[in-house]
Image (cartoon, helix red, strand yellow):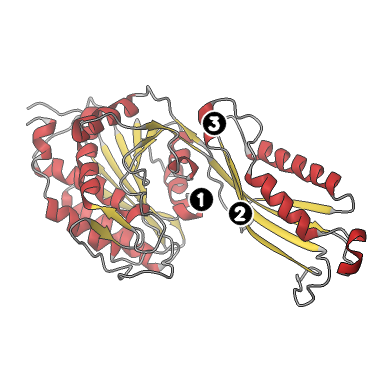
Amino acid sequence: MTGTDILDTIDIESCFELLASMVQHKSYTETEGERELAVVMHDRMTQMGMSSELQPVAGKRVNAIGCLKGEGGGASLLFNGHLDTNPATEGWTVDPWGGLIDEEFIYGIGVSNMKAGDAAYFCAVETIRKAGIKLKGDVILSFVVGELQGGIGTVRAIEQGLWADYFINSEPTDLQALTMHAGSTMFEIELTGDTRHLSKREEACDALAAATYLAQRINNLTFTGANTPDQIAVNRGHVGSMQAGLGRNYHDWRPPQVADQAKLKGSCRYGPGQSVETVTNDLKQVLEALKLEYPKLQTSLRIGGPTPNALQMPPFEVDRDARIVKALNSAFETVMGHPQPTGSIRPPAFYGTDAAHLAGAGMQGVVCGPGGEFNTMPDERVRKQQFLDCVRIYILCIIEICEIKES
């Protein structure tokens, strides 16, 4: 049986049923539902005939890691995806955990980010198993927790020996091949000015006006060290929240006064060759320039997440000529009939993903998964056809990398 013959054996209804059942688990980060879904995936891999373990992460949190052992002689391929989801927001018109399937879409919180990718690689391996295909190389499926906390699940898995020659991270890219994405760090800036009544505004140092000017500067930044078009493409500063008012409590009941205190929080995206340190230095230079516009202004800068020990998502890059990228490109073209968009694709290039942790451990891989078009929004959904096309692409990638063992 050839690779393309196997595609005709996919159990489409079974694929949809699996994804719908995964959506029906409310697997918010660091909740019992996150663990329950990991257990479900562990049980499913065991029932499929894979060796599987529930790998400890922290406390009661676990990853589900399964391996379809090859016959020997082929390269190993790891699929990586997270089970935790963003919270459901207001504005949904369907049940976020209903797993609704209509003629075109599958709906649910986390279906795009990223349970459709998780289900796609499970279904790809299950199809190969049911077809009786023997592979030379190992296929490893990792269903991790805590990606939304900086990738703690994947980091712990690597520390406990997770390894393969190649990997595919299944974050939502609408099936495009993402070969570079940004690193991510957060910041908090406090500005202290000097208040006066509006009648004496010329004597004041307006922290709110300075904050507004600063936000525009940060939102237009390209950080030091971006030397290629791809690196420039993944550079972005962003101010996501701002407070201003009187005093450290930002009193806002006295608007005739000039604000003497402001706080900005945001995130920076930077590319390979850049670092948290270079981004920090760039932000410091922007603050020094701000003081020239507002001479009496005092500034402070804090770099890092909402908690002191939060993991950072580093940047990721793989050569476009790497074997795994070429295998993915070939599989995509076979299934879709046209070349695969490849590179620092926007908007996925601004994501942080566990691919960066895997690459940092010495594995070569690429990011490609279903979803993205309707990601992180009310009525989050994935096109059914795209989900099935992803299953087909993964099957062909597995066969190309791991190779069929001839009987």
Residue for point 54% across, 31% down: 231
Q: CA distance from mark 1 to mark 2?
A: 9 Å
- Checking the image for residue 150, the label placed there is 1
Image spot of residue 195 (x, y percent): 87, 65
Q: Residues within 10 Å of mark 2 (few under 14, many from 20)?
A: some
Residue for point 10% across, 44% down: 130
Viewer-side residue, 377 vs 182: 377
Residue 350 higher or lower than 247, as above or below: above
The residue beneath circle 2 is: 305
Image spot of residue 210 (x, y percent): 78, 54
Q: Quadrant of residue 196?
A: bottom right
Image spot of residue 10 (x, y percent): 12, 45
Q: CA distance from mark 1 to mark 3?
A: 21 Å
Quadrant of the snapshot with the N terminus: top left
Mark 1 vs 3, N-terminal side? 1
Q: Is residue 243 left or right of residue 348?
A: right
Tell me the amino acid under the disc marked 1: Gly
Q: Is residue 203 left or right of residue 339?
A: right
The residue beneath circle 3 is: 231
Tell me the amino acid under the disc marked 2: Gly
Tell me the SS state at disc 2: loop
Q: Quadrant of residue 16?
A: bottom left
Mark 1 vs 2, N-terminal side? 1
